Amino acid sequence: MDLQPIRVLLADDHRHIHEIVATVLGEVSDIELVAQASNGQEALLLCKEHQPDIALMDIVMPIMNGLEATQILRQEYPKIKVLVLSSFQR
């Protein structure tokens, strides 16, 4: 049986997070990183274009934060699952 890979979009404003996630997911054969965004607004545009299965969403981002983007994402693309990814420190 040939299963389709899980399609993932990453939204984070830190380049090193993109590099780490891309490296880790590149080692997994059943997960494909289909798009990378640096803010919530870009993530929404890329979700429309790529229709990922999962969005890895940072909370603190410029232009549109992850919470705002997730609210819109849940309304417009209810099938896309959202996982919060944050490196926020107090």
Image: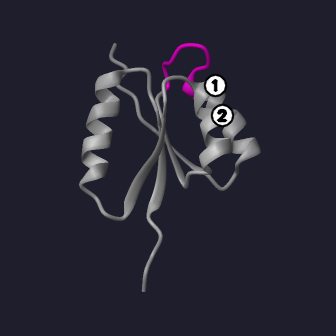
The magenta segment: 59-66
The kind of residue tagged 2 is Leu
Magenta residues, dominant SS class? loop
Residue 38, x across and y down, in percent: 49, 24
Residue under circle 2? 45
Does the residue at mark 2 contact the one at mark 1 (Cβ under 8 Å)? yes
Q: Is 20 left, or right, of 74 in this rendering?
A: left
User: How packed is label 1: few (under 14 Cα within 10 Å), some, or many (20 or more)?
Assistant: some
Identify whether 37 is placed above or below 8. above
- Residue shown at 49% from the left, 55% from the top: 7
Residue 59, x across and y down, in percent: 50, 25
Residue 29, x across and y down, in percent: 31, 63
Identify whether 56 is placed above or below 66. below
Which labelled disc corresponds to residue 41?
A: 1
Q: In which quarter of the image is the C terminus?
A: top left
SS for callout 1: helix
- Which of the two residues, 90 or 13, is positioned nearer the viewer here? 13
Q: Could you tell me how far apart the alpha carbons at marks 2 and 1 are, in whole angstroms? A: 7 Å
- Which of the two residues, 52 or 84, is positioned nearer the viewer here? 52
The kind of residue tagged 1 is Gln
User: How packed is label 2: few (under 14 Cα within 10 Å), some, or many (20 or more)?
Assistant: few
- Residue shown at 56% from the left, 27% from the top: 66
Which labelled disc corresponds to residue 33?
A: none
